[in-house]
Amino acid sequence: MVRVPNLVELDVPQAAAVRGELLRGLLACPAVIAPKYLYDALGSRLFAAITELPEYYPTRTEAAILAAHRDAIAAELPRGLTLVDVGAGNCEKAARLLRPLRVSTYVAVDISLEFLREALERLQQHHPDVTMLGIGSDFSSRLRLPAVLGEGSRLLFYPGSSIGNFMPAQALDFLRQLHAAAQGGALLIGVDLLKPVEVLERAYDDPLQVTAAFNRNLLRHVNDLVGCDFALADWRHRAFFNAAQSRIEMHLEARRGVTVRWPGGERAFAAAERIHTENSYKWRADDFATLLVDAGFTVIRRWTDERGWFAVFLAGA
């Protein structure tokens, strides 16, 4: 009999708290919406589609690094470990590691529990011997894991260069949380590196406009959460590299003057006014290694692709 993954919901903000956070962002100057709201069920599927685009190099570059060096990674780790996949999404990245890393328990953490449910049910069919747990949690402000995980060896897995969504000081704080959660185990993390601007900008503004759909879907999600009346046709996707901050920025830009209303309030946006929806910081490998050490890790190994576009770090806690 195939096991059924267990599902747990932790630290999920109540509707009033979500509404308050979103409205504070919409009323700010400039307006901002946290990138975690990109990932409702539809947003998660759109992001999965983005990873298939030829312009979006991070996913396949990271996958190639992990495939090329999985034996070396496994040699550094004990058998029967618990793999904690932070920001698991469709679980495909971790799925490729379950057997090579001899994982006994797989814990998938993601903000969209329903998307996670479907992914884990599919994955369990292929790995009936692995205990699986799905945790629905907004870990962007605090990472918390349930006591049921026990005290066994842990590998925290944070792929996809998601650490780039944090400002550097926030990244340091989150890495310290990962260090604590590893409980003496290790962290396997993917980091996007600096590269030519034209490569970066194509990755976040593709010709098929899948990334644009992903970004604009955020407004549909906010409409559902707050009761706003955003019309998606009024907004265009903007993505560009901010060299001074070493980050890609994503924005939604008003095509014309528009007033957005919600129960009890409204906000007027001028033509070309923007809502800031995401940052993706790009690192130098040595600088990120220093950040890991500052967070309490011992840097064990580091691998990059031939072009030096992406790095995978295995860091001991």
Image (cartoon, rainbow, N blue to C red):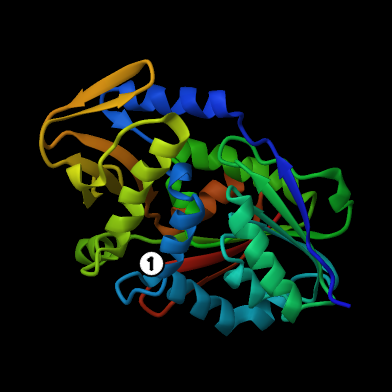
Instruction: From the viewer's side, name the closer residue of 184 and 271.
Output: 271
- Dot 1 crowding, Cα within 10 Å, few <14, some 14–19, many 20+: many
The picture places residue 30, in percent across and down from the top left corner, at: 26, 27
The number of numbered badges drawn on the structure is: 1
Instruction: From the viewer's side, name the closer residue of 71 and 45.
Output: 45
Residue 259 visible? The answer is: yes
Residue 157 visible? The answer is: no
Point 49% across, 72% down: residue: 62
User: Relative to 310, is 317 on the left or the right?
Assistant: right
The picture places residue 188, in percent across and down from the top left corner, at: 63, 62
Point 76% across, 45% down: residue: 145
The picture places residue 127, in percent across and down from the top left corner, at: 77, 78
Looking at the rendered structure, the kind of residue marked 1 is Ile
Instruction: From the viewer's side, name the closer residue of 161 and 145.
Output: 145
The picture places residue 75, in percent across and down from the top left corner, at: 74, 77
User: Relative to 75, is 237 on the left or the right?
Assistant: left
Quadrant of the snapshot with the N terminus: bottom right
Whether 263 is drawn above or below 124: the answer is above
Q: Quadrant of residue 115?
A: bottom right
Residue beneath label 1, please?
50
Furthest-top residue in view? 264
Q: Quadrant of residue 271?
A: top left
Point 72% across, 43% down: residue: 9
Instruction: From the viewer's side, name the closer residue of 174 and 124.
Output: 124
